[in-house]
Amino acid sequence: MKFRQKFCANLLVVLASIFYTTLAQATLGGDSASVRADEQALVASDAGTVILNQYSIQTFLVGTLVVKEFISLDGKVFAIAWEGRRHPSLKVLLGSYFADFQKSRVKSKKLHTRGAHSVKGAQIVLETWGNMRKLQGHAYLPSLLPQNVGADEIK
């Protein structure tokens, strides 16, 4: 009986760690399936998809926060953007690029615009701006930007 309880407890730990690892690897740089994992991790609701010539935009809502994930034709999430009264969980959305963001944040510069910050890492660019009622930002991977798509399109 004790063996069975220990086995079940260990199995639950293994399954939980696999689930958590999957969430942590999803998102920026991940495939299009990672968008659903982001929605679940952020407890968000799907707000639709817009399909453009070179990419699609998957939008979801986390309360009053609007999060968009930009997905290239080859199925990679190359950028994210957000707007709301707070910033989203960057640890969830940046995934494996969060460490690069944290390292680069130390060297980041405050822009002349009120409340604006820009972080340029080895692999990631993240910019935030806005005021207390309307915070905005975006992050993208320059190496994954589709051809003829500029960073100014990520809104």
Image (cartoon, rainbow, N blue to C red):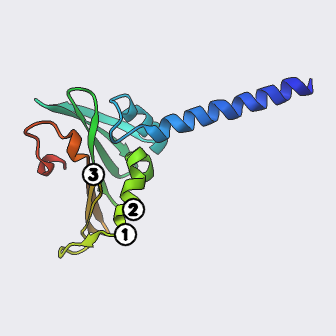
> Distance from label 2 to label 3 (Cα)?
15 Å
| Nearer-N-terminus badge (2/3) | 2
Q: Secondary structure at mark 2?
A: helix
Report the residue marked by disc 2. Answer: 103
Q: Is residue 49 left or right of residue 37?
A: left
Residue 32 in the image, given as x and y percentages of width and height:
33, 29
Say above or below: 83 vs 132: above
Residue 106 bears which disc, if any? 1
Q: Report the residue at 22% width, 75% height from top.
A: 114
> Distance from label 3 to label 1 (Cα)?
17 Å
Cβ atoms under marks 2 and 1 closer than 8 Å: yes
Q: Is residue 155 left or right of residue 119?
A: left
| Nearer-N-terminus badge (3/1) | 1
Q: Amino acid at mark 1?
A: Val
Q: Amino acid at mark 2?
A: Lys
Say above or below: 56 vs 143: above
Residue 87 in the image, given as x and y percentages of width and height:
36, 58
Image quadrant assignment for residue 7 = top right
Q: Report the residue at 58% width, 32% height from top.
A: 18
Task: Look at the image and tell me whether residue 49 can be seen.
Answer: yes
Report the residue marked by disc 3. Answer: 139
Image quadrant assignment for residue 34 = top left
Q: Report the residue at 10% width, 29% height from top.
A: 53
Q: Secondary structure at mark 1?
A: loop
Residue 154 bears which disc, if any? none
Q: Nearer the viewer, residue 21 or 67?
A: 21
Q: Is residue 33 left or right of residue 40?
A: left
How many residues crowd mark 2 within 10 Å: few (<14), some (14–19), many (20+)? some
Image quadrant assignment for residue 55 = top left
Q: Amino acid at mark 3?
A: Ala
